[in-house]
Amino acid sequence: DAKTTQPPSMDCAEGRAANLPCNHSTISGNEYVYWYRQIHSQGPQYIIHGLKNNETNEMASLIITEDRKSSTLILPHATLRDTAVYYCIVRGNSGGSNYKLTFGKGTLLTVNP
Amino acid sequence: GAGVSQSPSNKVTEKGKDVELRCDPISGHTALYWYRQSLGQGLEFLIYFQGNSAPDKSGLPSDRFSAERTGGSVSTLTIQRTQQEDSAVYLCASSSETSGAMTQYFGPGTRLLVL
């Protein structure tokens, strides 16, 4: 899997948008960008993924740059329950051992009242 | 619909005892994965089941660890003669093997403490 770089921590005010950056400059053409988060003492939670186009679902938006070397996860209206470690990973599609997920250090997002 | 469920949520055992951890994947998901996560550490892949294919057991740390998946659904991870270093959160995930990305959905985990 391509390596990703994320800031170790970020703060956000409740109700404001949280923008979490991720660099993945060595991403290859068939690798997806995935975001998961892990709230303290819980299992990882899938948020969103994308290949080339920007994506939006009920949880978040994913903005991928045209060269695909970086992306931003946007939580439009952060709540206190969004405080968690957010992991950005890149991985290929089915085949080989792409199913073995690995998380880096991630970004600890703290949403403040 | 229902997500991945795991039981028990917590397990405390004595060194040398055997433990069984259970995972119920999302209905219809053909792929099932076991990982473990030690305190403050990242994910460690253990084993992968896909349909009727032979499982990928390459991540099992020792022969004390085994897993099975009956009927292509429920899976059990068994740790024999537990050791203190086995203490960790054991996570199960499942995915639907569709073309393209394979999104894995995780359960809440089983927190194992070996005394």
Image (cartoon, rainbow, N blue to C red):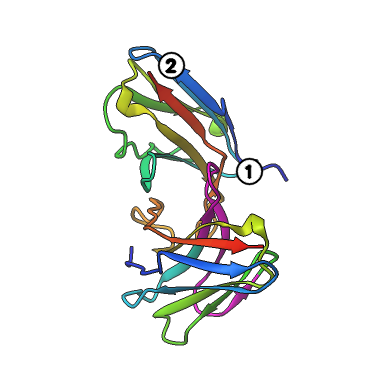
Name which residue lies at 36% across and 69% down: A5
Q: Secondary structure at mark 2?
A: strand
Q: Position of residue A89 (x, y in %)?
A: 42, 63
| Chain under disc 1 | B
Q: Which residue is mark 1?
A: B28
Q: Position of residue B93 (x, y in %)?
A: 51, 43
Real-space CA distance between mark 2 and mark 1, rounded to the nearest whole angstrom? 33 Å
Quarter of the image for residue B28 reads top right
- Name the side, left or right, on which A19 lies relative to B38: right
Name which residue lies at 70% across and 69% down: A15
Question: From what the image shows, is residue A89 above or below residue B9?
Answer: below
Q: Secondary structure at mark 1?
A: loop
Quarter of the image for residue B2 reads top right
Query: Does A54 lie within the magenta span?
Result: yes
Residue type at mark 1 is Gly
Give the mark nearer the N terminus: 2 vs 1: 2
Query: Does B34 lie within the magenta span?
Result: no
Q: Are marks 2 and 1 on the same chain?
A: yes
Residue type at mark 2 is Thr
Q: Position of residue A93 (x, y in %)?
A: 44, 62
What is the magenta range? A36-56
The extreme bottom residue here reads: A66
Question: From what the image shows, is residue A38 above or below residue B2?
Answer: below
Residue B107 visible (yes or no): yes
| Chain under disc 2 | B
Q: Which residue is mark 2?
A: B13
- Name the side, left or right, on which A102 lies relative to B29: left
- Between B70 and B90, the one lying in front of the other is B90
- Name the side, left or right, on which B31 lies relative to B35: right
Q: Residues within 10 Å of mark 1 (few under 14, many from 20)?
A: few
